[in-house]
Amino acid sequence: MLIFWSADIPKPSATQTVAVTLKQSKYQPQSVNALNFSVPNIQAGAIALTVPNIDAALKTMLDVEHFIVELGGRAVADIEWTGGLAARAKLSQCVSQR
């Protein structure tokens, strides 16, 4: 599961399914269903996306990553990071021991 937190993401009183568009670095935008939820005492709302499996997640991890999550036609999360290959190596090592 991939979870995005942002003050621009709605904070529903109960978890709900929402349609979002995920834009990810070099990949085509994808329209998917996601879970929108909130946690008490956290100022940001959350959008959770399912990942088919850990192998799929590892395969698509890039060293420099940029995600935009759109809800209702507007960006509610815009995040990027570096060091994805090092994170992928650590995650791969971790899951190989299961």
Image (spheres, grey):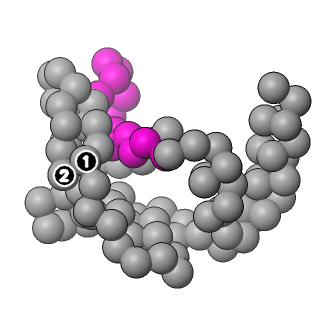
Mark 2 closeness class: few <14, some 14–19, many ≥20 residues within 10 Å: some
Image vertical order of residue 33 relative to residue 95, above or below: below
Coordinates of residue 95 in the picture (x, y in percent): 78, 35
**Badges 1 and 2: C-beta atoms under 8 Å apart?**
yes
- What SS does tag 2 mark? strand
Q: Residue at x 28, y 37 (%)?
A: 35
Of 54 and 4, nearer the camera is 54
> Residue 71 location in percent, x, y?
19, 57
Please provide percent x and percent y for residue 77: 35, 58
Pinpoint residue 15: horizontal percent, then vertical percent: 22, 26
Residue hosting label 1 = 33
Residue visible at 12% across and 60% down in the picture: 72
Residue 48 within the magenta-colored segment of the rendering: yes
Nearest the viewer among 77 and 56 is: 56
Write down the quadrant of residue 54 in the picture.
Answer: top right
Depth check: 7 or 22 in front? 22
Q: Is residue 11 above or below residue 89?
A: above
Specify few, some or many for label 1: CA neighbours under 10 Å numbering under 14, 14-19, or 20 or more. Answer: some
* Residue at the image point whose x is 60% and y is 54% from the top: 56
Tell me the magenta residue range. 38-51
**First reached walking from the N terminus: tag 1 or tag 2:** 2
Quadrant of image for the C terminus: top right
Q: Which residue is mark 2?
A: 19
Instruction: Determine the secondary structure under disc 1.
Output: strand
Residue farthest to the left? 72
Would you say residue 97 is visible in this rendering? yes
Residue 78, by quadrant, is bottom left
Label 2 amino acid? Ala
Image-based side of 53 in relation to 88, left or right = left
Dot label at residue 77: none
Amino acid identity at mark 1: Asn
Query: Is residue 60 rendered to the left or right of residue 78?
Result: right
